[in-house]
Amino acid sequence: MNPVPDIFRILPELILTLTGVAVMFIDASLPSGWPRRPLGWVAAIGTTLALWASLWQLSLPQGTAFFATVETSAFTIFFHVLICGIVLVALLLSLDTLPEDSHHQGEFYALVVFGAVGMCLLTGAVELLVVFIALEISSISTYILAGYRKNTGRGPEAAIKYFLLGSFATAFLLYGVALIFGATGTTQIYEIAHLAPSAQNHAFVLAGMALMLVGILFKVSAAPFHVWTPDVYEGAPSPVVALLSTAPKAAAFALLMRVVYEMFPTLHGLWSPLLWIVAVLSMTVGNLAALRQENVKRMLAYSSIAHAGYLLAAFAGLGTSGIAAASFYAAAYAAMNVGIFAVITLVSGYDEKLPMIEDFRGLIYRSPLLGGLLIFFLASLVGIPFTGGFFGKFYSFSAAVDSGAVALAIIGLLNSGLAAAYYLRLALVAAQRTPGKSGEEMAPAPQVGVAVGAALFFAVAATLILGIVPGAVLRAAEAGAHTLQAPPVQSGVPGLSVAQQPNP
Amino acid sequence: MNAINNSILTLILLVPLAGAVLVALAPDRAKLPNWIALLTALVSFGLTLHLPAHFILGQGGFQFAINRPWIENPAIFYHVGVDGLSLWLVVLTGLLAPVGVIASWNAITERRKIFFVLFLLQQTAMFGVFISLDLMLYYAFWELSLVPMAILIAMYGRKDGPKAALKFFLFTFIPSAPLLVAILWLYAKTGSFDFVTLQILIAHGNFPAGPLFWIALAFLLAFAVKVPVFPLHGWLADTFSEAPVALAMVVAGKLGLYSMLRFHIGLFPVQAGAAAPYLIALAVIGILYGACLALVQRDFWRLLAFAALSHLSLITLGIYGFTFTGSAGAVYQILNHGVVDGALFVLLGFLYDRYATSQIAAYGGVASKLPRTATLFVIASLAMIGLPMLNNFVGEFLILSSTFTGVSRGWAIAATLGVILGAAYMLWLVQRLFYGPESELTASKPADDLHFRELAVLWPLAVLMLVMGLAPSIWLPSIETGIHPPGSKVIMVIQGSVLPRSILPISSQGEGQR
């Protein structure tokens, strides 16, 4: 067997790290008066290269590197591409909307890219300590980004809340890892997967798994671990929320799949009902709370909690169908959510002078393009056919129905009816004529620059492609799902484990 | 000609969509969006006329069918086709498109582009509903049809658009959640979304009766809201008074009624039979309740809404009477209702644009100032009442007589009372609007009667009412090929006489999976 150099296995992460370091160096060495905006393009180019590198990894045989701590497989590539895509769109969005003056723009771009390193590594890690480190890399960047509007009251509040609660969650996760290590004597996920069946009833394993689930469910903001979400989303700048509400969540969902489907498949009977409850809670709590919000970003924060619930419904599915459905949902959700936050960034502005639902009144008259896009993304969030949101829900709930969880599907779909109420409220307000007041206090139509235009275009294209021809993405998700299982024979006989893998 | 036959349905779907894109790209100058939309509507109407021209009467099953894979997993097919049931509904949808454009010609003054883009999108969605034979494809169009409608109601609502739009959307969207679960359940059991395959499998009795009861109920509920059937009509009056004329005339009735015939009765004849007594009762209640409420309305949009409830309930009665004549009459009556309601909406919309009120009491003596409007309105009203020689008479007669002989005399007599009440509220409306002394409002506005544009759509509609009343034999034979008394259709399908060979492997595979 011709071994693949270890370095190729982490090529995207490597490119992203180099980009981030380069951005910081250039930022530091530029004279203070010079514009920092080009650094955003550097970061965007680096991210694009990383995206290509992930796609290139498809040509590598599936396998691990660095003493079986990171893995490349169809599954990791799927999430690498997804995360790089989200980060790219978020960077393009920031390019046109960050205020030009100081504001530490260089650091902003570097942090976004470093965050991407953590998230990518998180999806590829097969060693719990690397998982922890990756999670920390991505979290610390996002903590800082969340508080980027230092001059407002809400910015630092958001950052501190996110940091405190996030650290707790990471601590839970770490404690879970420690307990599992205590029970099995290893932190390598494949090895744990092989040992777990014999240690099924070991109290440490069960407690460890529960603690890890708590930590991960916090990161995906599923109820009842969701309380931080609305405050953080409200306080953080909108371009950051576009990133925050999608990429780290996608990475955390990838980790969740790895933990439950790869590490503890034999404990299905335990975690499946648990996730069932969390799914129902998330949908219901998220949607009910969203109904009463007046601030658009808070409303979308609760909606993202509900969407975490829909995604968790896919976990009721068995094996590959569940993994594929959850992966697909993560992609569809990312496309539409990034899109809607892009529109909101443009309408509300970086300083958010217009944050309330009422401020969107008559948007379609002010700017037909943004109004139309807002309604389009909202329609996708509702789950109207021919948009990505529809097939996301469709696969998620059909995975649930397939495995017999009809009740979960019915609760989920009724919830999506409930959700339509508040999405529609925003859409219809945007479509309504502003009565009487001719010209008075009519906010000017926001300008759409090249970078933002590209960001919007990518988001719309992705949402439409996922809604009209989802075949290719679904195949990729399924290929990923097939690779998400511990190799049958572990490290002792290298080569054999690869040969016995089902070919994606 | 074969090439056209094989792609005509795709063309019908794509033309409005292409028109929508064209409107979106064209500059918003003067009436340019209107002209593009009109042209698109006329072209798509022309295309729909191809269907009856080349429809082969003797041949059962679906014609002009296209069946191609769309998505592999789950196996969703782009499967479209028309039979006698959907044939004329497609044509009706095509016909109402230019009518809708003309009705919006002067009524829509701002953001014309958005209006016509969404209007044409709605057109595609409705065509899609009528021709889809794959349940997922059907569901996709069904849901899609909600969005343009809701947005346009919100944008152009007369008083409180968003509220009416939200009501309309939620009323239709929430019941479609159980519908989707039901469709998914059928797929989980069979591995197919195909209408014909599922029909065969269900007819073979391969399913446990318990779950099937709930599945059928989920289908029925989603459709009953859309029709609407009596206790589920809460959205109708608000939608009628807020929606732009071009959309109000297509929002109720045909989509829901067609879906009942095709997918509720078509897929679950046994369960539909069991539900029929309840639906007949609800339909008769709806006929009387709608008529009584129409009598006391002060706003003509709301009057029209309750009149529609009454008439649509009559059609529901025809459908669930489970008689051959009744079903054929019901389909015919869907067409009649579309034509007559379309004309009435255009005329009332014209009055509303001129006088800016829908309060009936504000009008009076309009006939002396707008004689052409009055003439056409009277014709349409008489058609609506069911005057012999006009179209509604045929449909109502078929439904009522078949109910009388085939279902129950009591229900038939009660339903006939509704028809009498119908004459009362319509004639009274005509009297209050057009005759009597001139009111302050009508006296204050100069006479400005219907223009050539409006006349060009209204007179053909009026002639159509007459032709449909005099010569129903143009329509009924082809409709009847799509209607089979419950039971017989299924048997015929099983015998394989109309079954395309290609379906068999799928169905056996589906059974294998179970």
Image (cartoon, coloured by chain):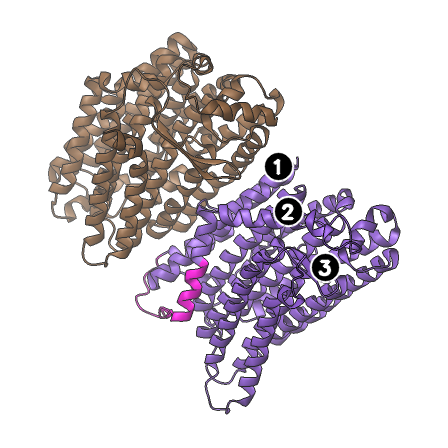
Chain colours: A purple, B brown
* A17 shown above or below A217: below
Give x and y (percent) for residue A61.
63, 55
Please check whether the numbered discs 3 and 2 fall on a single chain. yes
x 73%, y 50%: residue: A496
Q: Is residue A445 visible?
A: yes
Mark 1 residue element: helix
| Three-letter amino acid code at the position of disc 3 | Val
* A2 part of magenta stretch: no
Q: Residues within 10 Å of mark 2 (few under 14, many from 20)?
A: many
- Chain designation of label 1: A
x 48%, y 43%: residue: B170
User: First in sequence: mark 3 or mark 2?
Assistant: 3
Residue B479, label in figure: none
Residue A270: which quarter of the image? top right
* Quarter of the rendering occupied by the N terminus of chain A: bottom right
Residue A482, label in figure: 2
| Three-letter amino acid code at the position of disc 2 | His
Mark 2 residue element: helix
Q: Nearer the viewer, residue A62 or B138?
A: A62
- Chain designation of label 2: A
According to the picture, the residue beneath numbered tag 3 turns out to be A126
